[in-house]
Image (spheres, rainbow, N blue to C red):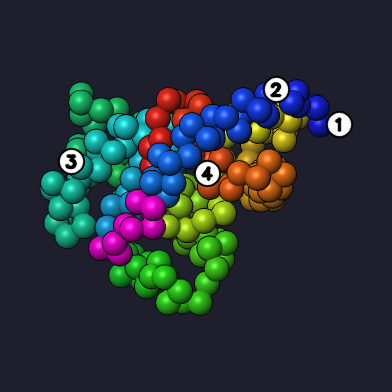
Amino acid sequence: MKRAIDKSTLTELREAHRTKAAEIANRLREFSDVPPEEYFYEVVYCLLTPQSSAVNAGRAVEVLRAHDLRNAPIDPAPLLHQKEFYIRFHRTKAKHLLAVRDQYAELHPHLLNGSMGSTSMELRLWLVKNVRGLGWKEASHFLRNIGHRNLAILDRHILRNLVRFGVLRGLPKTLTAKRYLAIEEKFRQFAVKIAIPMDELDLLFWWMGTGQILK
């Protein structure tokens, strides 16, 4: 059985949402306003985030952008291994960056709004199957960052809060595709139940875990 949540805990959550609602709404608008010419560096960012901090991934993207990763024949591995920021598994991630650069001409048309007739969930599945280094979490993260909605980004901050608020009984040991989608649906139902849109709740949970509302 799921653990019953104290009403005061839910009240605290709703109050936190009221406090951060304007900032969260502004961040979601920023995602929707990302121009298509920036999609490449958004996918680069999401390829760098696994087991690395969002702040460090953002710093790494700026370095890669300055060296024109999109167009220049550079090796990104040395650029990801710097004292100023720490990117775990930088060699493996560098290979993923080179792979996505090589296939970006194929990838980009799939990302243009509605151009391929795909729903957000269909597009996510295509990304997971076709882009090296993008798992379910990373593909969801990327699509959210370019304006898609109602896709759960099941990182540790989200999962811990789903346990805290009784949506899950415990943290999953692994996240298979089936388990990911099942947890996402539970998250979606919880969001409906408490009348906070899932995308807003995602950013709220992130703020509760980090004190920041980042992309």
Q: Position of residue 119 (x, y in %)?
A: 55, 68
**Amino acid type assigned to the residue bearing label 1 in the image:** Met
Q: Disc 2 or 3, which lies upstream in sequence?
A: 2
Residue 104 sits in which quadrant?
bottom left
Answer above or below: position of 123 versus 169: below
**Mark 1 vs mark 3: in front:** 1
Whether 30 is among the magenta residues is yes
Q: Disc 1 or 3, which lies upstream in sequence?
A: 1
Question: Which class describes the residues within 10 Å of circle 2: few (<14), some (14-19), or many (20+)?
Answer: few
Q: Main secondary structure of the magenta part?
A: helix
Q: For the point 30% across and 64% down, which residue is it?
A: 36
Numbered circle sitting on residue 1: 1
Kindly state the secondary structure of the residue where label 1 is placed: loop
| Mark 1 → mark 3, Cα distance in angstroms | 49 Å
From which residue to which does the magenta span run?
29-37
Quarter of the image with the C terminus is top left
Identify the residue position indicated by label 2 in the image: 8
Identify the residue position indicated by label 4 in the image: 200
Q: Is residue 180 visible?
A: no
**Amino acid type assigned to the residue bearing label 2 in the image:** Ser
Question: Which class describes the residues within 10 Å of circle 3: few (<14), some (14-19), or many (20+)?
Answer: some
**Amino acid type assigned to the residue bearing label 3 in the image:** Val
- Asked if residue 174 lies left or right of residue 105, the reply is right
**Amino acid type assigned to the residue bearing label 4 in the image:** Glu
Q: Disc 2 or 1, which lies upstream in sequence?
A: 1
Identify the residue position indicated by label 3 in the image: 63
- Asked if residue 141 lies left or right of residue 197, the reply is left
- Asked if residue 201 lies left or right of residue 61, the reply is right
| Mark 4 → mark 2, Cα distance in angstroms | 20 Å
